[in-house]
Amino acid sequence: MTATDATAEQAPIALAVVGHTNTGKTSLIRTLLRSSRFGAVRDAAGTTRHVEAATLAAAGQAVLQLFDTPGLEDSIALLEVLQALRPSGAAAGRERLALLLQHAADYPDFEQEIKVVRQAACSDALLYVVDIREPVLGKYRDEIAILSMAARPLIPVFNFIQSDRQNLQRWRRAMADFNLHAVVEFDTVAFDFEAEKRLYQKLQTVLEARYAQLQALLDYRRQLWLSLQRSAAHQVAELLVDIASYRRTASEISHYCSRGK
């Protein structure tokens, strides 16, 4: 391994969080950060209009750089534009995206989508957030087709999984149609640390060269989670002891009863 390769493997992993509008992309990042201050979350489409970044660190060392991207809104029309482009090389998908970015000014209707494409093209991997309550429509298939052109590892993240387990299976089959089998169930509302652990493990699978970095992050976050659990258990135990040892004298009880009359 050269010094340049070693430096590259120590740099933060660029992870683009992508998907349709209002699927929970910002909420996913907030959950990973354990912070409600990142970005804006509203029950309305198009809340995120620009790419915003945040960093996850392990013991002071930056490991993941998360990029929150605008929602994809018109993937059907964008895919038609991309397919109409005629790249000269063999890497048709990547060259189509490159041509789109080179001539971005010619496509003002796709301002938000171009921001997503630009970030996807320069990231190490993509997290495609899916609201599994939605039916598997053509526009979502087109989104995956567009994102796949970036030639980056793409991991679907199924959100709101507690609401519709039957539809979850439909989404799994749809992802399998695109040969995307490394999926993650990560409910940003009903958070489970096991889901976060599986997310890092799936990233280790598709980013083998960054395995050690991701393992350091996973170990660090596990220790934080265990520490939080111990603290919560201690607080509950203190509360139970306080309740069990609570005493009132007969005179105090009589005083309050008389006041009640």
Image (cartoon, rainbow, N blue to C red):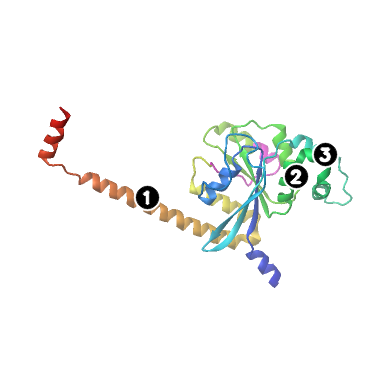
Q: Which of marks 1 and 2 is nearer the N terminus?
A: 2
Q: What residue type is labelled 3?
A: Val
Q: Is residue 129 visible?
A: yes
Q: Nearer the viewer, residue 170 or 117?
A: 117
Distance from Cα at disc 1 to Cα at disc 3: 53 Å
Q: For the residues marked 1 and 2, what is the alpha-carbon distance in whole angstroms?
A: 45 Å
Position of 60 with respect to 74 (left or right) is left
Q: Give the amino acid at mark 2.
A: Ile
The quadrant of the rendering that contains the C terminus is top left
Disc 2: CA contacts within 10 A as few (<14), some (14-19) or many (>=20): many
**Which residue range is magenta in the image?**
173-187
Q: Is label 1 in contact with label 3 (beta carbons under 8 Å)? A: no
Is the residue under label 2 in contact with that under label 3 (CB below 8 Å)?
Answer: no
Q: In this view, does 23 lie to the left or right of 253?
A: right
Q: Position of residue 221 (x, y in %)?
A: 50, 56
- Give the labeled residue for mark 1: 232
Kindly state the secondary structure of the residue where label 1 is placed: helix
Give the mark nearer the N terminus: 1 vs 3: 3
Q: Mark 2 points at which residue?
A: 114
Q: Is residue 20 rendered to the left or right of residue 84?
A: left
